[in-house]
Image: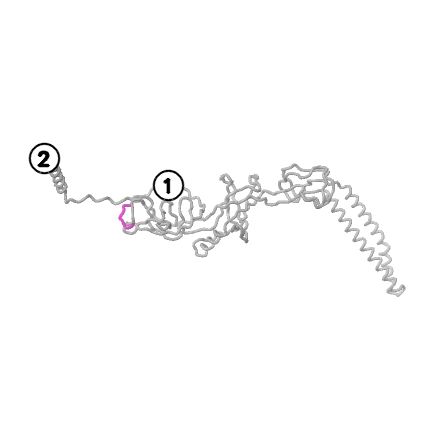
Amino acid sequence: MINNKISLIVILCIVAVAVFSTGCGRRGGAMPAMPDPEVSILTVKTERVVLTTELPGRTTAYLVAEVRPQVGGIIQKRSFEEGAEVKEGDVLYQVDPSLYQATYDRMKAELAKAEAKITPLKNKYARHKILIETKAISQQDFDNTVADFNTAEAEVHACKASVETARINLEYTKIVAPISGRIGKSHVTVGALVMANHILPLAVIQKLDPIFVDVTQSSANFLRLKRSVLEGLVKSNNVRGAKVKLSYEDGSPYPLEGIMQFSDITVDQSTGSYTLRIVFPNPENALLPGMYVRAMVEEGIIEDAVLVPHQAVTRNMRGEPATFVMDSADKVATRNLSVDRSIGDKWLVKAGLKAGDRVIIEGVQKIRPGIQVKVVPFKSQETPVIMQAVKN
């Protein structure tokens, strides 16, 4: 048993010596050098970028008019179809005019009576004016004549005003459309009694072409953009008159562009946002009041923007954006970045990179700062960049 163990030890020693001798027999005894890791780089170039942001909003009618009666009476006729287009001045309802016609006729008769009374008083006034100059009548008689004439003349003016009031009330028995647009449902029927101070409108007319879109933007984004403009990073875009694109609630695009009309000057205290109003053409009435939409609003322009692909930006130990770059000796270095927002599949870089820098796009898993690398061409597929701003 002991002899078997000794024999096994001897055999293992012989094998170890043979393996050692074979290793020492290789050229120089050195391990082969590892090849440099391959990376793909992209040379940074500046480009002109129009900054836009996507904002939620609601559509609002361009004009809204409530049809209300200005005189009371019984509705005799309705002259429109619910949901139809009406023009300004079209007769919508007819109130029973008989009472107002009678009042108008009576006021005209009162005017004729007053004009008949003033004729002799006018002649008397003309005669007494001559007689008072020759002292043929007393001053008291002349004063009485003047007072009677002025009273009769005032009565004529009062009767004319009454006639005009009666005529206006008679015209008001025809309830007409105050604006052109689409009329909604009627809240009264023929035979209903309406009053001048009717609480519920008889109908509502809305002008839908063009149409307003009211969107909200946070005041924080406004302050961020304002600082960028003051620092010279962004060229201010005139808010009023800026072109705006629109998409429906389901994401499909609206085919026509809108124009920014104004931005509100007051921030809502409860939401910290303010309102932007945009005007869109709506010839087919595809947009209806109250619809939820999303608007692409132009904020500003950067003439020399630096954009890098998303895949080139990582995060350091502190969670800050960073990227790997190639220095002049083809060695790897790190750069901390300040990014503003995502534009399409790229980051908009505010600081940390400049034109001409070589950013490593592919192969970042195999590298570390300071090592030598081998550069291979980066093959990218150019895709259209959608200038949609996403808050970083």
Q: Amino acid at mark 2?
A: Asn
- Label 2 SS: helix
Q: Position of residue 158 (x, y in %)?
A: 79, 53
**Numbered tag placed on residue 381 in the rendering:** 1
Point 74% across, 42% down: residue: 73
**Numbered tag placed on residue 391 in the rendering:** none
Q: Nearer the viewer, mark 1 or mark 2?
A: 2
Describe residue 49's horizontal placement relative to residue 188 as left or right: left
The extreme left residue here reads 3
Q: CA distance from mark 1 to mark 2?
A: 74 Å
| Mark 1 or 2, nearer chain start | 2
**Numbered tag placed on residue 3 in the rendering:** 2
Is 370 within the magenta?
yes
Relative to 305, is 22 above or below? Answer: above
Describe residue 388's horizontal placement relative to residue 264 as left or right: left
> Is disc 1 in contact with disc 2, using a CB cutoff of under 8 Å?
no
What range of the chain is rendered magenta? 369-375
Whether residue 69 is visible: yes
- For this rendering, which residue is in front, 282 or 2? 2
Q: Position of residue 93 (x, y in %)?
A: 70, 40
Label 2 crowding class (10 Å Cα cut-off): few <14, some 14-19, many 20+? few
Q: Amino acid at mark 1?
A: Gln
Q: Position of residue 55 (x, y in %)?
A: 50, 46
Relative to 270, is 6 above or below? Answer: above
- For this rendering, which residue is in front, 343 or 87? 343
Q: Position of residue 30 (x, y in %)?
A: 17, 45
